[in-house]
C-alpha cells in the first residue's frame, strides 16, 4: 500500500518538528497526543491529529488503515555508535572479568580489540557480511531505524578495507540509513607496540589516503585513552581525516580522564562518546560547543565502569545522546530500548530524557533530523507500534519485556 493511516492510537509520542537537538531540562518534555491518528504516503508522514478531528477519507485507493486499539506509537530509535561488524564474540573475556580481571588486564594478555583483530584476519568477507547482516536485522526488529557502524577491528589497512567493504555492502542493501565511520585508531597492533608514533604515521600516510580514495566513510574516529592513543596523536590523525573530507568523532574519557573531550571541542567533532570520566571542566567546554555528548550505557554496565555524570551534564544544558556501542567485548547488545532502560535504572536519566536522547538528539548527531527522530509531516514513516496498553513509562519499567508489536515503515 502506498498510503497508510494509523488510528485510535492510545498515545502518539514525539510529536514535534525536531530539527534541532533538545538540551538540558527541555529533555524532560516529550510532546504527545492522546487518542490520535497519523497518516503517511509513500513512506513519509503527511499529517496527524486527534481522533476527535479525524478527517473524512475521500480517496481509498491503495489505502491501508490500522486500528491501533489501545496501542501507542513512537518514532523508531537511532543508534549513533556501533561496532556490529565483527568475526566472533569474546565470551571467554566475559568469564575472565567475572573472575576479577579488568578490561586493561585482559587487553594486556592479548584479549580485547587485538583479539577481535585476529578474528577479522581469519574471517572471509562473505562470512563477516553474513554475521553482520544478521545482527543488523536484529537491531531493526528491536526498533532501530538508522544506525552508525564503525570499522576499527582490522587495525591495518587490508583488514580495515575488508570491514569497510562489508559495512558499505550493508549500507547499499539495508532498508535503513547507515552512516559509516572509519575508526582509524582503535588499538595498537603487536608489531607497533613499541612504536606508537610509527603506527600513527602509518595511519596518516597509508590508511587515511586509502579511505579517502575509496569514499566509503562519513566519519573518522579515534580511541583517545591512556595506553592507547594520546590527545596529540589523536589530533594528528583527526586533522588528516578532516583534510580528507571526514568528520571527526572521538572515544573519550571511558577508562580514565584522557583529554578526549577537550580535543573534541577544539576540533569541532561531531561527538565525544563514552564520557564515564568526564570532568566538570569538560562539561563546561561542551556547554559552549556544538559537540554532541554520547552516553553508552551498555558498555558502562557490562564493564562495571562509573556512570557518566549525567545529571551534571543535563543541568549544564547539554543535549545528551544514547547509543548501544554494540560490540563483541564490552557491549554485546544492539537493542536501543535496553540502552534506554540502563540509562534510567543505572545512570539516573528520566524516561523522557532517555527517549529524546535515542530519537531526535540521536538523529541530529547523524544529520538525519530532517527525516527521522520525531513525528512530523515530511519525516519518514518509520514507527514503533507497541502491544496493547503499553506506554513509554511501562516500556522502561518492565525491563525484561518486549513491548513492540510491529514496526511500521
Image (spheres, grey):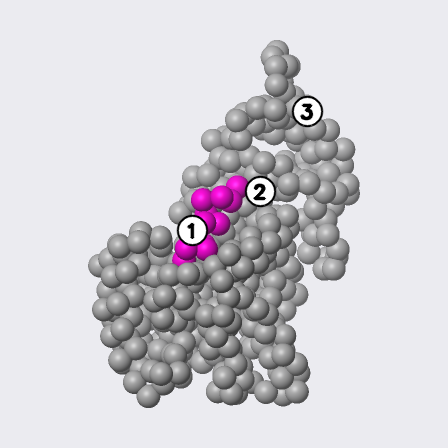
Q: Is residue 320 shown above or below 303? A: above
Would you call the spot at circle 3 few (<14 residues within 10 Å), some (14-19), or many (20 or more)? Answer: few
Q: Quadrant of residue 244?
A: bottom left
Q: In the shown orientation, is residue 70 left or right of residue 25?
A: right
Confirm whether the magenta stretch covers residue 103: no
**Element type at mark 2:** strand
**Element type at mark 3:** strand
Q: Which residue is mark 3?
A: 65
Residue in the image at 61% along x and 29% along y: 38
Q: Position of residue 352 (x, y in %)?
A: 60, 52
Q: Which residue is mark 1?
A: 168
Q: Position of residue 150 (x, y in %)?
A: 44, 61
Residue in the image at 61% along x and 18% along y: 62
Give the label, 2 or 3, closer to the camera: 3
- Kindly tell me whether residue 31 is visible in this rendering: no
Question: Which quadrant does the N terminus fall into?
Answer: top right
What is the distance, in whole Å, between disc 1 and disc 3 at their CAs?
36 Å
- Kindly tell me whether residue 166 is visible in this rendering: yes
Farthest top residue in view: 58
Would you call the spot at circle 2 few (<14 residues within 10 Å), some (14-19), or many (20 or more)? Answer: many
Q: Which residue is mark 2?
A: 75
Residue in the image at 49% along x and 70% along y: 122
Q: Is residue 194 shown above or below 275? A: below
Amino acid at each position: 500500500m502506498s498510503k497508510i493511516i494509523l488510528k485510535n492510537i492510545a498515545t502518539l509520542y514525539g510529536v514535534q518538528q525536531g530539527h534541532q537537538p533538545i538540551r538540558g531540562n527541555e529533555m524532560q518534555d516529550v510532546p504527545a497526543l492522546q487518542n490520535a491518528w497519523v497518516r503517511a504516503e509513500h513512506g513519509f508522514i503527511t499529517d496527524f491529529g486527534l481522533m476527535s478531528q479525524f478527517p473524512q477519507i475521500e480517496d481509498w485507493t491503495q489505502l491501508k488503515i490500522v486500528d491501533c486499539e489501545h496501542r501507542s506509537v513512537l518514532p523508531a530509535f537511532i543508534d549513533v555508535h556501533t561496532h556490529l561488524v565483527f568475526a566472533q564474540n569474546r565470551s571467554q573475556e566475559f568469564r575472565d572479568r567475572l573472575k576479577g580481571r579488568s578490561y586493561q588486564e585482559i587487553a594486556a594478555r592479548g584479549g580485547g580489540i587485538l583479539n577481535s583483530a585476529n578474528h577479522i584476519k581469519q574471517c572471509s568477507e562473505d562470512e563477516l557480511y553474513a554475521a553482520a547482516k544478521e545482527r543488523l536485522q536484529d537491531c531493526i526488529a528491536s526498533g532501530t531505524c538508522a544506525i552508525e557502524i564503525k570499522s576499527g577491528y582490522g587495525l591495518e589497512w587490508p583488514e580495515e578495507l575488508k570491514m569497510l567493504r562489508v559495512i558499505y555492502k550493508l549500507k547499499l542493501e539495508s532498508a535503513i540509513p547507515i552512516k559509516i565511520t572509519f575508526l582509524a585508531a582503535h588499538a595498537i597492533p603487536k608489531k607497533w607496540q613499541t612504536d606508537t608514533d610509527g603506527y600513527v604515521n602509518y595511519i596518516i600516510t597509508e590508511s587515511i589516503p586509502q579511505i579517502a580514495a575509496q569514499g566509503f566513510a562519513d566519519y573518522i574516529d579515534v580511541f583517545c585513552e591512556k595506553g592507547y592513543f594520546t590527545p596529540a596523536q589523536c589530533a594528528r590523525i583527526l586533522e588528516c581525516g578532516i583534510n580528507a573530507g571526514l568528520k571527526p568523532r572521538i572515544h573519550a574519557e571511558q577508562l580514565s580522564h584522557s583529554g578526549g573531550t577537550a580535543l573534541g571541542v577544539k576540533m569541532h567533532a561531531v561527538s565525544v562518546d563514552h564520557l564515564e570520566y568526564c570532568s566538570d571542566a569538560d562539561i563546561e567546554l561542551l556547554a559552549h560547543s556544538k559537540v554532541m555528548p554520547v552516553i553508552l550505557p551498555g558498555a558502562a554496565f557490562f564493564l562495571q565502569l562509573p556512570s557518566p555524570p549525567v545529571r551534571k551534564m543535563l543541568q549544564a544544558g547539554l543535549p545528551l545522546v544514547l547509543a548501544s556501542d554494540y560490540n563483541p567485548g564490552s557491549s554485546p547488545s544492539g537493542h536501543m530500548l535496553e540502552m534506554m532502560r540502563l540509562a534510567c535504572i543505572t545512570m539516573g536519566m528520566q524516561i523522557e530524557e532517555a527517549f529524546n536522547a535515542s530519537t531526535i538528539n540521536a538523529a541530529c548527531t547523524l544529520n538525519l533530523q530532517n527525516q527521522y527522530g520525531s513525528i512530523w509531516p515530511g519525516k519518514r514513516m518509520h514507527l514503533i507500534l507497541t502491544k496493547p496498553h503499553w506506554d513509554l513509562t511501562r516500556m522502561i519499567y518492565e525491563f525484561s519485556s518486549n513491548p513492540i508489536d510491529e514496526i511500521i515503515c
